[in-house]
Image: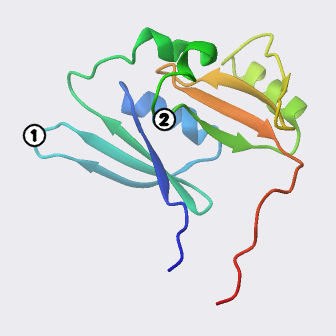
Amino acid sequence: MEFRFHHTALSVSDLEASKTFYSQLGFEPAMDWIDPSGSPKISHMALGPVLLELFSFAGCRPAPESADRLETDLPRIGSKHFALQVDSIEEAKRFVESMGWATDVAVVEGKTGVRYFFVPDPDGILVEFVEDRRNLRTEPTAP
């Protein structure tokens, strides 16, 4: 049996604002669905072979305050963020700043050997941009 990563899901407050944000990062619309009652609304966006599933519910609730900052969010059990790999962290930083998503972005040299930074999406969900030159990926082995 072979397992492959399929998608990650985010609950968002404004589906159209989130779709716009993620489309500016290269995600393309793949499918939309709206419950006949009007809630939830679901949008799948594709980036290569991976899908981002966006949920929007009427009466949504904000994340806890601890999710606002990486240092308070990481110790909390559960999903934390997702990362987009880039060839140049400096180019990604310029892009993010030019979009007005963050100013004075601080690139961090990670303890695990990558360079990265985070920006919040329209709902404050952290998105990591990472330059990873470690070549940790493994190739599937033949059966």
The colouring scheme, among rainbow, by chain, secondary structure or one colour, is: rainbow
User: Who is closer to the viewer here, 5 or 111?
Assistant: 111
Q: Nearer the viewer, mark 2 or mark 1?
A: 2
* Quadrant location of the C terminus in the rendered image: bottom right
Judging by the rendered image, the residue that carries numbered circle 1 is 37
In the structure shown, which secondary structural element does the residue marked by tag 1 occupy? loop
Give the residue drawn at x 88%, y 50%: 134
Q: State the residue in front, 82 or 38.
A: 82
- Observer-nearest of 2 and 20: 2
**First along the sequence among labels 2 and 1:** 1
Q: Secondary structure at mark 2?
A: loop
What's the residue type where badge 1 is placed?
Ser
Q: Which mark is residue 114?
A: none
**104 vs 135, nearest the viewer:** 135
Image quadrant where residue 39 sits: top left
Q: Is residue 12 left or right of residue 4?
A: left
Residue depicted at 47% across the width and 32% down the height = 18
